[in-house]
Image: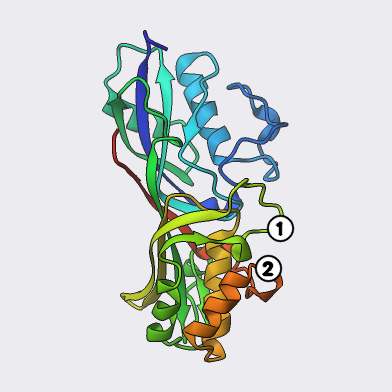
Amino acid sequence: MSDNRNIKLIIAYDGTDFSGWQRQENQRFSCLTEFCRGQNSLRTVQGVIEEALGKMHKEPVRLTGSGRTDAGVHAAGQVANFYTTIKSISPERFVPALNGLLPRDVRILEASETRPDFHARFDAGMRTYRYHFVCCRHALPHESRYSLQLWRHPRLELLNAYGRLLLGETDCSIFAGAGDQSKSRSRYISRAGFFIEGDKLIFEISANAFLWKMVRSIGGTFLHYEERGTPPEKLRDIITSQERNLAGPTLPPQGLFLWKIEYYRS
């Protein structure tokens, strides 16, 4: 890769019609993915961007993302990198070039040249997700793709007391999806809180990494126990029990956004 430039992308996408970020194993790694079109079961964000890169380069180009998002989950600040053999185009020109080849539900926001050994996943220091809620009113049609309807106003003070229970190094086993294959379920969480933005309720959480469906499980668990008025000390016992059956329902994906990725060295 020493003769190639390493390009870092910041990407936004509407995850509604995707099977998640990661290219499917049965999706060809090449720019020739005609067989995937019209088959949402195979359509992935990584796949469509690699297809666009392949058209530009006339050969397959592998894209490395900061992490996976599940089917239906959106992104406002996903980060990825790829190596390019093209010398004649400035890094920022990859933005219009790729957007001209991509479907409307994926946009490249920024492109820049980074150090040769930059790795979007392994160099990520902190990942932030946001979950959006519409409370006590009918969600507008366009909002239903990007938020969850709540027919009550939850108590922010209690929810934020729950969030403080997670800060620091935390065993998150209770929040892991049944298919999670992580060797360790301990995560460092720097923020977990709820706030009002405009007329929406937002749950924001930042951590060094996340388990499969962890954010949706935390949000569902907090709302489940908040509705019942469970005191924080009782929820602390539930979390430390590591009993998955004590977690609340896992929220649906449409309200969840990968919000930003922070790098301490890029």
Q: Which element is circle 2 on?
A: helix
Q: Would you say the residues marked 2 and 1 are in contact, meaning their CB atoms lie under 8 Å apart? A: yes
Tag 2 residue: 244
Image position, residue 72 (x, y; %): 58, 55
Q: Residue at horizontal 34%, vertical 75%?
A: 195
Image position, residue 136 (x, y; %): 47, 87
Q: Residue at horizontal 59%, vertical 40%?
A: 44
Pick the front one: 192 or 64 = 192
Image position, residue 53 (x, y; %): 47, 24
Quadrant (top left, top right, bottom left, bottom right) of the C terminus: top left
Pick the front one: 238 or 211 = 238
Whether 34 is drawn above or below 264: the answer is: above
Label annotation for residue 178: 1
The amino acid pointed to by label 1 is Ala
Whether 168 is drawn above or below 52: the answer is: below
Q: Is residue 103 found left or right of 191 in the rendered image?
A: right
Q: Residues within 10 Å of mark 2 (few under 14, many from 20)?
A: some
